Image (spheres, rainbow, N blue to C red):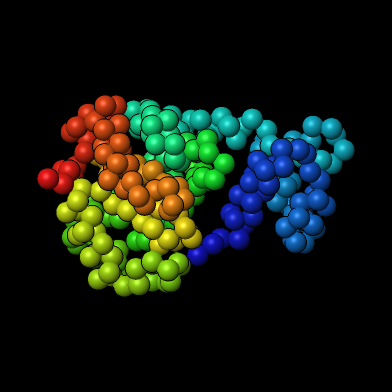
């Protein structure tokens, strides 16, 4: 469920991140299709709180550095471990594909840190991207670290939809995929959510937290080398985080 005022506030922040230029109340209202009065009130509130200012004194607003200061303080208290950042940076170099670190958030998996492939045709992963937890390799890797009771509770709340041609459509299908992944020591998805996208994921336990490291790209490049990509992920995690951070053994 979305709270409209909160959603609108975040939409304004995303607008400035995309356009990177000041905007008037009228421009924001037109862009989002909002009423001028409610847009004026929202912008005025953000300006009063010190999150927007008028750089040209002509009614055009832009975010102040207060956003960055707040985000920096928040991130410093619970950052993505630097070792995992090094893992995904290495994986982009060794695999040529996009790599990211993800965490669980209710019925979703959220990208926390990402590095994109340098190739023209690639998967575009950005921090903050949310995906249904049950259809992705990242999500299923994280679900595998839950207790059976936690996993069953989560599976019972999911709204199963045919997002793509390989989406699991019920709890039993997800359980079967997780069991198969546990047997081989890594997780995968292929056109389960995004068309023609394949990915390999490995769960990580580090600093009392649980993450999933994923490498993904076009199916034509990824599917023929799933084993190789999984081995590369495990090797990078072992190098930068230590073998103890791999909670699941590799398949014999």
Query: On the image, which quarter does residue 140 sit in?
Result: bottom left
Q: Is residue 97 visible?
A: yes
* On screen, residue 193 above or below 156: above
Q: Is residue 237 visible?
A: no
Q: Quadrant of the C terminus?
A: top left
Q: Say whether residue 204 is left or right of residue 65.
A: left
Residue 16 pos. (x, y %): 69, 42
Residue 212 pos. (x, y %): 32, 44
Q: Nearer the viewer, residue 225 or 67?
A: 225
Q: Say whether residue 34 is left or right of residue 74.
A: right
Residue 236 pos. (x, y %): 30, 31
Instruction: Give the residue drawn at x 36%, y 56%.
Output: 189
Instruction: Give the residue drawn at x 79%, y 32%.
Output: 55
* On screen, residue 108 above or below 162: above
Instruction: Give the residue drawn at x 25%, y 48%.
Output: 186
* On screen, residue 45 above or below 191: above
Q: Nearer the viewer, residue 213 or 10?
A: 213
- As drawn, which residue projects farthest toward the left? 252
Residue 8 pos. (x, y %): 64, 55
Q: Say whether residue 33 is left or right of residue 230.
A: right
Instruction: Give the residue drawn at x 64%, y 51%.
Output: 11
């Amino acid at each position: 469920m979305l709270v409209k005022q909160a959603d609108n506030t975040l939409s304004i922040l995303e607008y400035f991140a995309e356009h990177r230029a000041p905007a008037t109340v009228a421009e924001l209202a037109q862009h989002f299709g909002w009423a001028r009065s409610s847009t004026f009130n929202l912008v005025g509130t953000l300006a009063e709180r010190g999150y927007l200012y008028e750089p040209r004194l002509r009614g055009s607003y832009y975010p102040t550095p207060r956003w960055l200061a707040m985000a920096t303080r928040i991130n410093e208290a619970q950052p993505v471990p630097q070792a995992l950042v090094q893992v995904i940076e290495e994986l982009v170099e060794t695999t040529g594909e996009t790599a990211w670190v993800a965490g669980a958030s209710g019925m979703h998996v959220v990208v926390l840190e990402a590095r994109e492939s340098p190739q023209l045709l690639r998967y575009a992963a950005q921090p903050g991207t949310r995906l249904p937890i049950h259809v992705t390799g990242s999500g299923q890797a994280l679900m595998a670290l839950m207790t059976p009771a936690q996993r069953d509770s989560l599976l019972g709340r999911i709204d199963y939809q045919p997002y793509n041609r390989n989406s699991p459509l019920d709890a039993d299908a997800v359980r079967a995929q997780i069991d198969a992944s546990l047997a081989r020591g890594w997780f995968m998805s292929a056109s389960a959510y995004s068309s023609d996208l394949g990915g390999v994921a490995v769960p990580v336990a580090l600093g009392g937290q649980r993450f999933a490291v994923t490498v993904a790209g076009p199916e034509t490049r990824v599917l023929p080398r799933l084993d190789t990509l999984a081995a590369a992920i495990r090797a990078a995690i072992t190098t930068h985080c230590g073998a103890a951070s791999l909670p699941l053994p590799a398949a014999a």
